[in-house]
């Protein structure tokens, strides 16, 4: 094992050790197995790992330096810009909320219209099925009655024409003289 610590290896090792301490037994067992496999691959023994931790404990690797803060004037401008952005987002949120409410109201109105239309359709279908289900006998009787009346009217009309078209017969009672 080298004297210089590889930051990637140290990060991987810390991640694996964090998983070992998890409450979930499956993750802990998998993490322990990963540590064993990595130690076998690198030829690291338990004592070497212990020496690594004792070497890290007194002088841990340097952490990244925090970003320096911006001057106060820039902070005030940023704060003002953030407040303006927040008020703009609030207005936008309020407008979207109103739009959503009106869309929901329109949706409810359309649903009620759809329900009324479905009811009218059902009523129309029921009336149509009742009309189709009526027995044909009354219709047949009406047609037969109309045919009979038409036939009688036709016969009567024909007889009337025959009577009107007959030549006038001389009156025999007057011709005997």
Image (cartoon, rainbow, N blue to C red):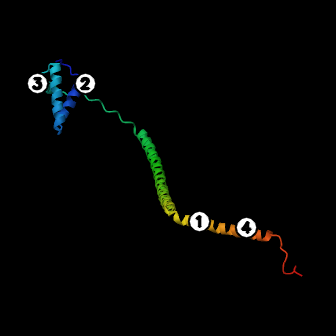
**Which residue was labeled with disc 4?**
158
Name the outermost residue toward the right: 177
**Disc 3 designates what residue?**
46
Q: Residues within 10 Å of mark 3 (few under 14, many from 20)?
A: few
Query: Could you tell me which secondary element the residue under label 4 belongs to?
Result: helix
Q: CA distance from mark 4 to mark 1?
A: 21 Å
- Indicate which label's residue lies in the foreground, 4 or 2: 4
Q: Mark 3 near mark 2, Cβ–Cβ under 8 Å?
A: no
| Mark in the foreground, 4 or 1 | 4
Q: CA distance from mark 3 to mark 2?
A: 20 Å
Q: Quadrant of the C terminus?
A: bottom right
Judge by depth and name the residue closer to the eye, 108 or 51: 108
Which element is circle 2 on? helix
Q: Return the disc, 4 or 1, that comes first in the chain's sequence.
A: 1
Describe the element under mark 3 as helix, strand or loop. helix
Whether tag 3 and tag 1 are in contact, CB under 8 A, the answer is: no
Instruction: Name the spot of residue 54 as percent of width and height, x first.
Output: 13, 27
The reply to whether the C-beta atoms of the residues labelled 3 and 4 are less than 8 Å apart is: no
Q: Is residue 112 left or right of residue 170?
A: left
Query: For the residues carrying marks 1 and 2, which lies nearer the camera in this image?
Result: 1
Position of the N terminus by quadrant = top left
- In the rendered image of this protein, does residue 82 appear above or below residue 59? below
Of pointers 3 and 2, the one earlier in the residue sequence: 2
Query: Which tag is nearer the camera, tag 3 or tag 1?
Result: 1
Label located before the other in sequence (3 or 1): 3
Cα distance, mark 3 to mark 4?
131 Å
Give the quarter of the image for residue 162.
bottom right
Q: Residues within 10 Å of mark 1 (few under 14, many from 20)?
A: few
Q: Residues within 10 Å of mark 2 (few under 14, many from 20)?
A: few
- Spatial CA distance of label 4 from label 2 is 121 Å
Which residue is denoted by mark 2 in the rendering?
Answer: 8
User: Under tag 1, what secondary structure?
Assistant: helix
């Amino acid at each position: 094992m080298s004297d210089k610590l590889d930051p990637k290896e140290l990060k991987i090792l810390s991640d694996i050790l964090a998983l070992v301490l998890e409450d979930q037994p499956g993750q802990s067992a998998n993490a322990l197995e990963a540590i064993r496999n990595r130690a076998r691959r690198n030829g690291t023994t338990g004592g070497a790992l212990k020496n690594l931790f004792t070497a890290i404990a007194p002088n841990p690797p340097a952490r990244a330096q925090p970003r320096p803060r911006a001057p106060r004037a820039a902070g005030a401008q940023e704060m003002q810009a953030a407040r303006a952005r927040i008020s703009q987002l609030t207005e936008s949120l309020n407008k979207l909320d109103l739009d959503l409410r009106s869309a929901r109201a329109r949706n409810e109105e359309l649903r009620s219209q759809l329900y009324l239309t479905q009811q009218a359709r059902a009523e129309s279908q029921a009336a149509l099925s009742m009309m189709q289900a009526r027995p044909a006998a009354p219709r047949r009787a009406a047609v037969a009655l109309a045919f009979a009346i038409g036939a009688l009217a036709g016969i009567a009309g024909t007889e009337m024409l025959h009577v009107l078209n007959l030549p006038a017969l001389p009156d025999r009672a007057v011709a005997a003289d």
